[in-house]
């Protein structure tokens, strides 16, 4: 089963920085170019440019040409990859809790009407 | 569903899951402390776990293997960090080779279990899971956790029906 594309490590590395996470959030609408984005941060244009390059390599943002302008836009699919692994891990533990619940509720001292509580139909 | 909250932090590589049970803390502790009980929930129905060692003391070891539908087996172990029955258990969950030796090239994830008494005879269980790095998380998921998770969830009804059958047959 393919869990994540090979650049997964890069995705997380790119997201490990607060400025870059902020750029990802701001670029969801895809309205600003590099220069406009740079104005939001107390750092040099070159520094912001570098962050954007890292995000671009990680597939988290793309640069798009709209008429004569070039805007930075978040690649939502890239962002979802980061979330997906934790989602799978959550599923694993949810499955375990369901089984734990089944064990606990089958105790003879538990009431019958408790039996189907806390279960989810799929 | 008794899962009351899930917090996932992709940057810190942690997942915390809170669950609530309609049973006292001692009963929930047994789910971890009794290997025969553990076997009934650790692995999904398609990959049941068998615990072959279970020394639930600080510095102790727990060893298990999971058997797939094709008879394939994967081995794992817990390295117990902290035990305070019936409230707290901290362990490192790792992979082992076919002979039970811990794999040095395989990642380990730390699991922190907190069991507390709630109101009205209920018990809260919080599971905090920490991965050392993104690559480790990916590897752990690829190795041990693809095993029919969907099947596990989809078979809940079957498990419950089996419990009903077990009980009505007087076992």
Image (cartoon, coloured by chain):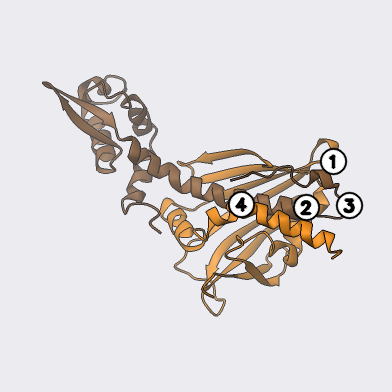
Chain colours: A brown, B orange
For the question of whether residue B104 can be seen, the reply is yes
Pointer 3: what residue? Answer: A109
Mark-to-mark CA distance, 4 and 1: 23 Å
- Name the residue furthest right: A109
Quick one: label 4 or label 2, which is nearer the N terminus? 4
On screen, residue A118 versus residue A89, left or right, reads right
Same chain? Circles 4 and 1: no
Mark-to-mark CA distance, 2 and 1: 13 Å
Badge 3 marks a residue whose secondary structure is loop
Pointer 4: what residue? Answer: A95
Chain name for mark 1: B
Mark-to-mark CA distance, 1 and 3: 13 Å
Pointer 1: what residue? Answer: B121
Badge 3: how crowded within 10 Å, few (<14), some, or many (20+)? few
Chain name for mark 3: A
Res. B52 mark? none
Same chain? Circles 2 and 1: no
């Amino acid at each position: 089963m393919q869990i994540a594309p090979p650049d997964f490590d890069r995705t997380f590395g790119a997201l490990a920085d607060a400025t870059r996470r902020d750029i990802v959030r701001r670029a969801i609408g895809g309205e600003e170019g590099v220069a406009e984005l740079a104005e939001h941060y107390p750092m040099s244009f070159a520094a912001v440019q570098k962050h954007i390059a890292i995000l671009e390599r990680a597939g988290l943002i793309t640069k798009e040409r709209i008429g004569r302008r070039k805007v930075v836009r978040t690649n939502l699919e890239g962002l979802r990859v980061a979330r997906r692994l934790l989602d799978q891990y959550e599923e694993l533990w949810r499955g375990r809790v369901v089984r734990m619940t089944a064990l606990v509720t089958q105790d003879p001292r538990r009431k019958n009407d408790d039996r189907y509580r806390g279960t989810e139909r799929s | 569903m008794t899962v009351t909250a899930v917090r996932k932090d992709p940057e810190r590589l942690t997942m915390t899951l809170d669950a609530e049970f309609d049973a006292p803390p001692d009963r929930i502790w047994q789910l971890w402390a009794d290997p025969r009980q553990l076997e009934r929930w650790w692995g999904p129905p398609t990959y049941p776990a068998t615990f072959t060692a279970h020394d639930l003391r600080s510095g102790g070891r727990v060893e298990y293997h999971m058997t797939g539908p094709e008879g394939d087996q994967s081995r794992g172990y817990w390295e117990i960090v902290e035990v305070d029955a019936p409230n707290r258990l901290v362990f490192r969950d790792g992979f082992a080779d076919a002979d039970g030796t811990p794999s040095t090239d395989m990642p380990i994830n730390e699991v922190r279990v907190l069991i507390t008494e709630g109101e009205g005879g209920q018990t809260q269980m919080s599971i905090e899971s920490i991965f050392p790095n993104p690559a480790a998380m990916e590897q752990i998921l690829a190795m041990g956790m693809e095993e029919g998770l969907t099947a596990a969830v989809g078979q809940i009804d079957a498990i419950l029906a089996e419990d009903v059958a077990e009980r009505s047959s007087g076992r």
